[in-house]
Image (cartoon, rainbow, N blue to C red):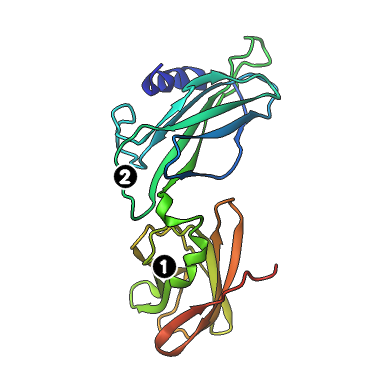
Amino acid sequence: MTIKTIALATLTVLISFSASAAMTISGTRIIFPGGEKEVSVRTNNKGDHPPLVQVWVDDGKTTGDVNSMKVPFIVTPPVYRVEPGKGQTVRVIYNGMSLPQDRESLYWFNMLEIPPVQADNAENKNRLELAFRTRIKIIYRPSSLGYSGVGKLKDVTWQTIDNPKFGHGIKVSNPTAYYMNFDGGSFTANGKRWNIDLDMLAPLESKEFYAKPAMPSGSAITDGEVRIINDFGAAMVRQLKVGQGGTLTLSAENKKQ
């Protein structure tokens, strides 16, 4: 069954019944070590009914046709049914496609859950059923890079910036070969705390982030903290201190919470 076929089935199901998400994935990301042929991903049914599940890999381009998309992984089984309280182990297999060996590569693991159609009775009439899609990152890590990019966080540079249109913010530059996965941050300026939506930085990428709501142009940032996600999906909180010329220095230790 192709992904397009699943989509049509989803539309048919959506018309009449009610459901809630039952399927879960063990872990929030998949680290695929270079040199390995495959890794296993566990999916589990926490619900009361046996859904139909489809899994596949995409390259993150929302406009692309996933059936013709070139990706380095295949997933098997691609379609399966899971009984209540049971699970299914899925194999993510490297297909040999050439990938950069001097930096990490990012792809996405998708799980589409279609709840079963319930008996057509008065109780189920006028109820809407939803199909749920879950996506997590697949990070291909060449064997030459070592275990984790969190240890390279010290190489990331931070600089305060002032933009007349967007207000005060920071520029973050990632000179490393690793994806840096941030989960937001905050800064103190003018005696107030301002949240900044830090997100993922690709290897060798720089991004600018601005406070929401906008921090007035000319604000004096005194300190802050950022949250980085490690390979296990846990948030590590690090403090930032402002230095000369608007540079920011990251603490070496995880902040106690």
> Tag 2, which secondary structure?
loop
Rendered position, 47 above or below 125? below
Residue at image point 60% right, 63% down: 236
> Is residue 131 among the parts visible in the rendering?
no
| Circle nearer the viewer, 2 or 1 | 2
| Whole-percent x, y for residue 55 in the image | 47, 28
**Residue 186: which quarter of the image?**
bottom right
Residue at image point 59% right, 20% down: 51
Residue at the disc numbered 1: 209
Give the Cα separation between the discs numbered 2 and 1: 30 Å
Q: Nearer the viewer, residue 122 or 212?
A: 212
**Residue 24: which quarter of the image?**
top right
Residue at image point 38% right, 19% down: 2
Q: Nearer the viewer, residue 221 or 2?
A: 2
Residue at image point 44% right, 35% down: 37
Q: Which quadrant does the C terminus fall into?
A: bottom right
Q: Nearer the viewer, residue 53 or 76?
A: 76
Q: Residues within 10 Å of mark 2 (few under 14, many from 20)?
A: some
Q: Nearer the viewer, residue 207 or 194?
A: 207
Rendered position, 177 above or below 50? below
Mark 2 or 1, nearer chain start: 2
Rendered position, 80 above or below 89? above
Q: Residues within 10 Å of mark 1 (few under 14, many from 20)?
A: some
- Which amino acid, by three-letter code, is at mark 2? Leu
| Whole-percent x, y for residue 143 in the image | 43, 50
> Tag 1, which secondary structure?
strand
- Which amino acid, by three-letter code, is at mark 1? Phe
| Whole-percent x, y for residue 230 in the image | 55, 56
Q: Which quadrant does the N terminus fall into?
A: top left
Residue at the disc numbered 2: 99
Would residue 206 appear left or right of 11 to someone viewing this image?
A: left
